[in-house]
């Protein structure tokens, strides 16, 4: 594992934890900061919703029918992330 002096890690595709922390959001933050935060948040949530949706909409009927456990596991991870 490479030395990481800033303890950076990816929280969403193309978004590092330090990117999120640098926003320092408050009610007085400008619209651009809030739009950037919304984009980051959406990317983070899509880590869970895209795979679940892919399973639910899969062209193979067996995958759609027998993926319930995996979908619920992804849902639980999403809930934990929101918490």
Image (spheres, rainbow, N blue to C red):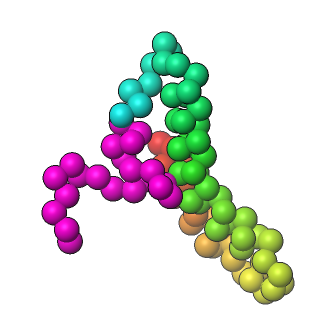
Query: Which residue is at a point 53% across and 51% down the rendered structure image?
Result: 44
Residue 76 seen anywhere in this rendered image of the structure: no
Q: Nearer the viewer, residue 49 or 35?
A: 35
- Is 82 colored magenta in this rendering? no
Q: Nearer the viewer, residue 35 or 62?
A: 35
- Residue 39 position, x and y percent, is 58, 42
Relative height, residue 72 to residue 28 (above, below): below
Relative height, residue 55 to residue 34 (above, below): below
Query: Which residue is at a point 45% across and 51% down the rendered structure image?
Result: 15
Query: Which residue is at a point 62% across and 64% down the rendered structure image?
Result: 72
In this rendering, position of residue 10 left or right of residue 45: left
- Residue 73 position, x and y percent, is 56, 66
- Residue 28 position, x and y percent, is 48, 13
Q: Nearer the viewer, residue 71 or 57?
A: 57
Range covered by the magenta-colored residues: 1-21
Residue 33 seen anywhere in this rendered image of the structure: yes
- Residue 7 position, x and y percent, is 23, 52
Which quadrant is the N terminus positioned in? bottom left
Query: Which residue is at a point 58% across and 22% down the rendered structure image?
Result: 31
Q: Nearer the viewer, residue 70 or 3?
A: 3
Furthest-top residue in view? 28
């Amino acid at each position: 594992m490479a030395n990481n002096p800033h303890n950076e890690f990816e929280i969403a595709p193309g978004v590092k934890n330090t990117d999120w922390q640098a926003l320092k959001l408050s009610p007085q933050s400008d619209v651009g900061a809030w739009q950037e935060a919304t984009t980051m948040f959406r990317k983070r949530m899509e880590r869970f919703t895209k795979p679940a949706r892919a399973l639910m909409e899969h062209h193979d009927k067996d995958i759609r029918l027998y993926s319930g456990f995996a979908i619920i596991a992804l849902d639980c991870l999403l809930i934990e992330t929101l918490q």
